[in-house]
């Protein structure tokens, strides 16, 4: 089969590097392009596609295709552009310009194939023209079930829990290990070969908190004596559970900052900033100044240089350029049984900035399950560890009441209704 003959063939003159002072934009070009997106592509890939230009005379050319690439090249400091040079008449020039602008618009996408292609990038969208919001919208074609409860609602802890140490619960796309976050073999078994993209954790503070209900529940390992050892063990395992350079958010008591920061640096992590959760009301206490904030250490596991915003929107940053160190989020309305529970909106803010929309979030201190719920409502998946079977039950029931889905015990494949009194005894 031979080459088809065009009805009005142009004359191809070859490929040339042409200085910008010899190039003219197409007069009246109707297309308006995203110069910033093209500049991002140039910074990542260079000029991988030539402009198409019409030769008008000696050292004089008009751009038929690639006018916005021309603008982006100039803005990036290029001295010349690689061009495919043709000769044609005025009518052909207009038709080529119109075709170049229009034909791409007529195509459609296979969203499944597009999602698969984007997934190979592992969240690094630099130079593609896609944003994290684009990916989130694409992956969000399957809508989340309507929430049945307020995300911050926390059920009461049972006196006699159904969960047992060693259980792994399947909560939709999430996993909960009832066990010790310093036990690397148990955590690896729960992860089943996965490594997580980010961590948002609310560890024991080392200040001996006691719940304000009649049961006066305490948080396991929340005494100051063993806190350094606990954090060291949990962060060592977290390094295994997380991808290299993964962003980490570690909530902590202001009085214990040195303990927490030391544990992070001893684990080989980079502490980048101290973030602030600013509450809507103060917390009465014995200090001269009543606290109205809680700090959160933000950093990266064994992070390479250039992580976070310095990475310019790569695999470690998905937020915009207007994020600050202060999160102004109201306190949860009901947290009597878990006095250090964090509002879901506080956690979702960090996850949206630091974890790809379909990524994995690690939480080694599950508590009441706020990190799991935050992952759920933002389209992420959580891998959670909780030592206390009572709070494992809280997490399971909270998820079930929020989604209507019963947790499934991995070892048996059997679902369990955590909203009913336990019938095992």
Image (cartoon, rainbow, N blue to C red):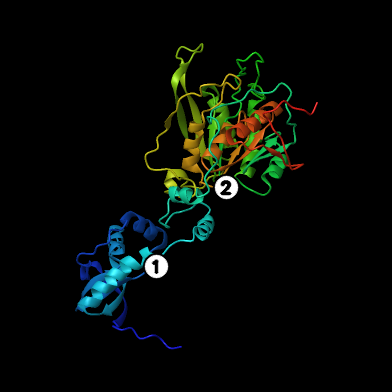
To which quarter of the image does residue 205 belong?
A: top right
SS state under label 1: loop
Counting from the top left corner in percent of width and height, residue 103 is at 35, 68
Taking the image as shown, residue 139 lies to the left or right of residue 385, namely left
Counting from the top left corner in percent of width and height, residue 124 is at 48, 53
The answer to whether residue 270 shows anywhere in this view is: no
SS state under label 2: loop
Mark 2 or mark 1, which is nearer to you?
A: 1
To which quarter of the image does residue 88 belong?
A: bottom left
Q: Nearer the viewer, residue 419 or 128?
A: 419
To which quarter of the image does residue 164 belong?
A: top right
Residue bearing mark 2:
244
Counting from the top left corner in percent of width and height, residue 304 is at 51, 47
Using a 10 Å C-alpha cutoff, classify the residue at mark 1 as few (fewer than 14 neighbours), some (14 to 19) or many (20 or more). few
Using a 10 Å C-alpha cutoff, classify the residue at mark 2 as few (fewer than 14 neighbours), some (14 to 19) or many (20 or more). some
User: What quarter of the picture does the C terminus occupy?
Assistant: top right
What label sits on residue 8 in the rendered view? none
Q: Is residue 37 above or below residue 294?
A: below
Q: Is residue 405 above or below residue 139?
A: above
Residue bearing mark 1:
48
Q: Nearer the viewer, residue 37 or 82?
A: 37
Counting from the top left corner in percent of width and height, residue 217 is at 66, 18
């Amino acid at each position: 089969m031979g080459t088809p003959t065009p009805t009005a063939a142009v004359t191809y003159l070859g490929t040339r590097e042409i200085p910008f002072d010899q190039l003219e934009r197409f007069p009246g070009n109707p297309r308006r392009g995203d110069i910033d997106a093209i500049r991002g592509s140039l910074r990542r890939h260079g000029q991988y596609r030539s402009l198409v230009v019409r030769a008008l005379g000696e050292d004089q050319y008009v751009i038929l295709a690639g006018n916005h690439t021309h603008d982006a090249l100039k803005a990036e400091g290029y001295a010349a552009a690689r061009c495919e040079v043709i000769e044609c008449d005025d009518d052909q020039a207009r038709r080529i310009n119109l075709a170049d602008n229009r034909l791409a618009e007529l195509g459609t996408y296979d969203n499944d194939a597009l999602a698969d292609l984007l997934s190979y990038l592992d969240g690094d969208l630099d130079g593609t023209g896609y944003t994290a919001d684009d990916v989130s919208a694409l992956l969000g074609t399957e809508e989340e079930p309507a929430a049945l409860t307020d995300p911050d609602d926390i059920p009461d802890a049972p006196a006699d829990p159904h969960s047992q140490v060693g259980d792994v619960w399947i909560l939709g796309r999430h996993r909960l290990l009832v066990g010790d976050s310093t036990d690397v073999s148990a955590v690896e078994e729960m992860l089943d070969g996965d490594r997580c993209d980010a961590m948002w954790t609310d560890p024991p503070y080392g200040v001996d908190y006691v719940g304000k209900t009649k049961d006066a529940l305490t948080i396991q390992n929340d005494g100051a004596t063993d806190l350094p050892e606990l954090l060291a063990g949990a962060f060592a395992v977290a390094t295994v559970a997380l991808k290299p350079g993964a962003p980490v958010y570690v909530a902590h008591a202001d009085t214990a900052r040195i303990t927490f920061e030391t544990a992070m640096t001893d684990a080989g992590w980079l502490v980048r900033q101290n973030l602030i959760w600013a509450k809507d009301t103060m917390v009465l206490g014995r200090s001269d100044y009543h606290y109205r904030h809680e700090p959160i250490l933000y950093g990266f596991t064994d992070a390479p240089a250039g992580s976070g915003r310095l990475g310019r929107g790569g695999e470690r940053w998905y937020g915009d350029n207007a994020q600050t160190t202060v999160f102004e989020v109201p306190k949860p309305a009901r947290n009597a049984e878990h006095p250090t529970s964090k509002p879901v909106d506080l956690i979702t803010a960090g996850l949206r900035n630091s974890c790809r929309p379909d990524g994995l979030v690690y939480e080694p201190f599950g508590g009441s399950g706020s990190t799991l719920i935050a992952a759920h409502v933002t389209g992420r998946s959580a891998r959670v560890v909780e030592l206390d079977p009572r709070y494992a039950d809280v997490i399971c029931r909270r998820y079930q009441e929020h989604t209507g889905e019963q947790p499934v015990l991995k070892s048996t494949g059997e679902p369990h209704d955590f909203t009913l009194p336990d019938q095992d005894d």
